């Protein structure tokens, strides 16, 4: 397969060829201008010398007598040599020479056929073939004291001599042309480097291939993808995004703003653009969408955002399965670690033959576990919620936090899969926040988290309280903001916002206050009867 030319090669070749063409054109035009200029200068010089010679007294006397003296010939020759003219000829009214640089041609008739106009009183420049060769001549009539024409003067420069003057200037033209050509090549190299840097070192063929690959990938994935610039203008979106947002196939991305697609959520999505937010829900186009927002930068400058979206109902089942697997894996990990330590302790007691202590140790360890299992099996009839609570129990225990499920708790099976997934997210976020608050607390209170579940004819009620440091009054107004967080790190700050989003999706409500345990208490109320969904968050 023939390897495509590199961008630098194309630029250098193109600019070099263009430079060569321009230089050839420039050189030709410059030569023509120079040749014409030197020719005109030579003619003007010849005409000026002819005027000077025609006014000399000795020349007028020689024409009147018909004879030229040796002194006149020497004087005219001196003028010719000083002016570097090739010839100075003086002729009478019959065009016979009385002065000529070649003494053998004195007395002979002038050649060229261009002298008659001078005898008629004209001064002019001509080019003709003479006895010495083709030349550029200046011809002037000679007048006596009465103003009568008594002869003419012809001063000339041979075309060969003029050509030699032109040839002396050709190296200057060549050097100028080569300088321009060299500058063109250097500019081509510079342009190649600049363009390649702008294209991140990629060649045109590679860019074309990447564009085709990107387009194929974007239109193959099952989620909608929308690329934005920093101002919220749509740069690109795939076919799936068009379907999710109900856009016309003829709608061009560059004509749309994010506020046109998601008017209620554009401000949130464009706020704090250097932060990644994953897995939040928004209501748009009469459906709930699971979205992620990822910023991208070009040369350390924020260049826009990438939004991914997928209808919530498509991933509810996968989300539930994944949540169950994760909770189960976490529970197994914690149990493995916990029971490994306990088995070592039990083994040591048996080796020491402290059998009574061993039996007592087993009883103590099984009592709390059995109580939680019994409560979950007898009163929490939704397996997903029971698994969630069991996983959080082990997570808290690993952090040496007492995790208690209220004995009054009860919950029946949840039939609505979407409702169940949202409940799991709400409970999981609130319990995680409570465990984290107790773990980071700077007080000497008992490390406790208490969870209560209940249901009435119209509501599911979920209550979680902790013995952490609580929520300050200054945080009351910002706790549901997308950037609120009491923890450090790029992935924090959206938990309570997601809780609020899911509550709005369920038409539920949340109350928070100080807990009797010393920390915070959150109470969630979710209607059991479905209501028409609204698009507010």
Image: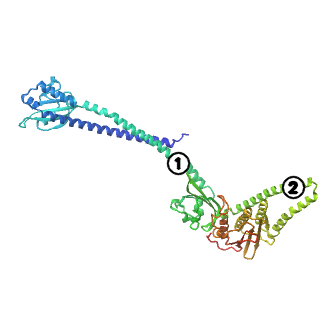
Residue at 64% x, 69% y: name it.
474
Residue 316: give x, y in percent of width and height.
Answer: 69, 63
Quarter of the image containing the N terminus? top right
Quadrant hosting residue 104:
top left
Quadrant hosting residue 455:
bottom right
Instruction: From this view, report whether residue 343 is shown above or below residue 408.
Output: above
Q: Is residue 203 toward the left or the right of residue 437 in the image?
A: left
Marking on residue 212:
none
Residue at 44% x, 40% y: name it.
185
Instruction: From this view, report whether residue 275 is shown above or below residue 159.
Output: below
First in sequence, mark 2 or 1: give its number. 1
Marking on residue 199:
1
Q: Can residue 14 be spotted in the picture?
A: no
Quadrant hosting residue 473:
bottom right
For numbered disc 1, what is the local secondary structure? loop
In this rendered view, identify the residue nearer to me: 109 or 157. Answer: 157
Report the residue that reaches farthest toward the left: 146
Q: Is residue 124 toward the left or the right of residue 466 in the image?
A: left
Residue 349: give x, y in percent of width and height.
Answer: 90, 55
**Count of all numbered marks drawn on residues in the image:** 2
Residue 483: give x, y in percent of width and height.
Answer: 62, 63
Residue 234: give x, y in percent of width and height.
Answer: 54, 60
Marking on residue 345:
2
Q: CA distance from mark 2 to mark 1?
A: 64 Å
Q: Can residue 532 be spotted in the picture?
A: yes
Nearer mark to the viewer, of 2 and 1: 2
Q: Residues within 10 Å of mark 2 (few under 14, many from 20)?
A: some
In this rendered view, identify the residue nearer to me: 257 or 243. Answer: 257
Quarter of the image containing the C terminus? bottom right
For numbered disc 2, what is the local secondary structure? helix
């Amino acid at each position: 397969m023939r390897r495509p030319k590199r961008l630098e090669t194309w630029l250098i070749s193109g600019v070099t060829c263009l430079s060569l063409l321009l230089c050839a054109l420039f050189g030709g035009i410059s030569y023509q201008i120079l040749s014409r200029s030197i020719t005109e200068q030579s003619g003007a010089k010849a005409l000026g010398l002819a005027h000077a010679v025609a006014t000399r007294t000795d020349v007028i006397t020689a024409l009147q007598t018909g004879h030229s003296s040796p002194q006149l010939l020497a004087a005219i020759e001196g003028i010719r040599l000083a002016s570097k003219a090739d010839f100075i000829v003086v002729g009478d009214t019959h065009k016979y020479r009385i002065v000529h640089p070649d003494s053998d041609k004195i007395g002979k008739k002038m050649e060229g056929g261009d002298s008659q106009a001078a005898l008629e009183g004209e001064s002019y420049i001509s080019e003709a073939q003479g006895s010495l060769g083709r030349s550029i001549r200046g011809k002037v009539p000679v007048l006596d004291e009465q103003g009568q024409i008594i002869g003419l003067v012809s001063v000339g420069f041979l075309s060969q001599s003029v050509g030699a003057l032109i040839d002396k200037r050709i190296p200057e033209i060549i050097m100028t042309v080569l300088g321009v050509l060299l500058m063109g090549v250097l500019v081509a190299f510079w342009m190649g480097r600049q363009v390649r840097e702008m294209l991140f070192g990629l060649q045109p063929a590679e860019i074309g291939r990447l564009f085709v690959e990107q387009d194929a990938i974007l239109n193959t994935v099952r989620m909608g993808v929308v690329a934005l610039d920093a101002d919220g203008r749509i740069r690109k979106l795939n076919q799936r995004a068009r379907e999710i947002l109900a856009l016309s196939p003829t709608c061009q991305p560059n004509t749309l703003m994010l506020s046109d697609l998601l008017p209620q959520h554009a401000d949130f999505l464009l706020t704090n653009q250097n932060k990644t937010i994953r897995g939040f829900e928004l209501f748009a186009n009469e459906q709930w969408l699971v979205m992620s927002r990822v910023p991208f930068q070009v040369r350390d400058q924020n260049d826009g955002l990438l939004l991914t979206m997928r209808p919530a109902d498509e991933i509810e089942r996968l989300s539930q399965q994944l949540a169950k697997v994760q909770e189960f894996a976490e529970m197994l990990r914690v149990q493995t670690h916990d029971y490994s330590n306990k088995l070592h302790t039990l083994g040591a007691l048996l080796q020491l033959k402290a059998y009574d202590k061993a039996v007592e140790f087993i009883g103590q360890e099984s009592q709390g576990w059995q109580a939680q299992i019994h409560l979950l099996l007898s009163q929490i009839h939704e397996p997903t919620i029971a698994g969630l609570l069991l996983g959080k129990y082990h997570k808290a225990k690993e952090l040496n936090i007492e995790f208690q499920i209220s004995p009054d708790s009860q919950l029946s099976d949840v039939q609505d899969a979407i409702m169940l997934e949202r409940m799991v997210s709400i409970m999981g976020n609130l319990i995680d926040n409570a465990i984290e608050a107790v773990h980071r607390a700077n007080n000497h209170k008992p490390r406790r988290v208490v969870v209560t579940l209940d249901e009435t004819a119209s509501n599911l009620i979920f209550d979680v309280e902790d013995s952490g440091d609580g929520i300050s009054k200054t945080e009351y107004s910002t706790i549901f903001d997308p950037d609120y967080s009491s923890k450090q790190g790029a992935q924090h700050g959206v938990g309570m916002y997601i809780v609020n989003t899911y509550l709005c999706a369920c038409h539920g409500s949340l109350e928070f206050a100080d807990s009797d345990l010393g920390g915070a208490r959150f109470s969630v109320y979710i209607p059991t009867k479905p209501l028409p969904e609204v698009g507010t968050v």
